[in-house]
Amino acid sequence: MTIKELFAPSDMTTGTPWKKIVLFTVPMLLGNIAQQLYSTVDSIIVGRYVGDNALAAVGSAAPIYNLLLVLFMGVSAGASVMVAQYFGAKDREGLSKSIGNAITLTALASLIIMVVGAVTIRPLLKMLGTPASIIDWCYSYLMVLVMGIAGTSYYFIFTGILRGMGDSVSALVYLLVATAMNIVLDIWFVAGLGLGVFGVALATIIAQITSAILSFIKLMRMRQVFDLKLKYLKPEKQFAGLTLKLGLPSGLTQMIFSAAMIVVQSLTNSFGETVIAANVIIMRVDGFVMLPNFSFGMALTTYAGQNVGARQLDRVTEGAKQGTLLALATSFVITGLVLLFGHNIMGLFTTTEALIDMARRMMLILAFGYVVMAITQCLSGVMRGAGDTMTPMWISLITTVVVRVPIAYGIAYLTRSPEAPNGSYYCLFISLLVSWIIGGVITWIAYQRGVWKKKAVIS
């Protein structure tokens, strides 16, 4: 394979399924690792140079920020499915209109998020009972991220479009550039200039804007595949409507998850700053352990989308089987490594031994769930790529609202004692493990039913 071919769109409708999936997944996995480094480096630098309370502030802000992103996430998810299917069908006009409408919808979503975020951030922090010792840091961190949301939004939408056409290598390169920039700016702003969590957020926004610009330049050079002209930026009911129809369930899924996380964050806050900080460490490590699952799931979304567009359903099911088995094996190995070296990994974030031990015990509870999530992410990715975005939404609704939140609060209530008036903090992770297992079972059943096979965007 030449360098030129490596950076070109990939047709996943031909060739051995597992090879196509692996070639697409590896760059995306590396990219997701780099993406995870954004938040991880933020946490390490803040924890080391500012303190455990600042680390807790960054973690407490995450669920609110994710909730504000749901509108954009919907546009991005819908666009990715449409791009993959029109690319697989070799429909240049449809592909051009899908991309143009996605760019316009992203601009509108960014404007809405900026306005809504500026008004709601502090009230949400107060409503959640964010400790007074960290609330100003949380607010500062979130406001910078929200004001720079356009750069973040376009970074994700442009790289999502590239992946929909099978080009995961370009997205990786631009992400590596942004990650390196983010690390350098983090150290300079926090350790050098003493800007604290404000500096961390500022570094992230600058890096993501840079990556968005590089991705846009790449798209402008792909004239052999589609046209990026002003006429395609005009919203059309067929394409804008389909993008939202496909994307809103994914956006709602993220909103449900983020809302549940906010509710659980309120419970987490009741346990105090130490548990909050331990939870931040776990979520950062969790992000890395989950990366193979997310990467294979995203690869199978593109794979399924292109092959559904090409009317090759038998190839979709074969790829789903092979991709899921690869994801299971990879997740099993990585989870084992994290458990084996857990103490050393947790020690990257803090020198407080009690905090390290608490985080390590929490990770032990979640271990089996990561393997189960390989099934959930891969089969959900196939259903989304085929155009069935509603089924994963309902599964998410059941596992987060019906399962996780009640179990978390129920265990907390039942374990109250004079020594732990708010209950055991283990409730946070036992509830998460149970929801993952139930979600995996429901996803497998939904995939086997095969409703997703009738949901293609292109008739």
Image: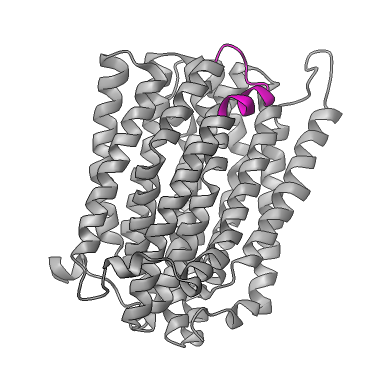
| Of residues 50 and 122, the one drawn nearer to the viewer in this rendering | 122
Q: Does the magenta segment cover residue 79?
A: no
| Of residues 242 and 298, the one drawn nearer to the viewer in this rendering | 242
Is 129 placed above or below 168 here?
A: above
Q: Position of residue 383 (x, y in %)?
A: 57, 71
**From the viewer's perspective, is 91 left or right of 360?**
left
Q: Position of residue 384 (x, y in %)?
A: 54, 68
Image point (51%, 60%), residue name: 328
Image point (58%, 60%), residue name: 248
Is 98 placed above or below 52 here?
A: below
Q: Does the magenta segment cover residue 124?
A: yes
**From the viewer's perspective, is 44 left or right of 73?**
left
**From the viewer's perspective, is 348 left or right of 248?**
left
**From the viewer's perspective, is 255 left or right of 289?**
right
Image quadrant in which you'd find residue 236: bottom left
Q: Which residues are magenta?
A: 121-134
Image point (69%, 62%), residue name: 441
Camera sees residue 2: yes
Is 22 placed above or below 412 here?
A: below
Q: Position of residue 407 (x, y in %)?
A: 78, 41
Camera sees residue 348: no
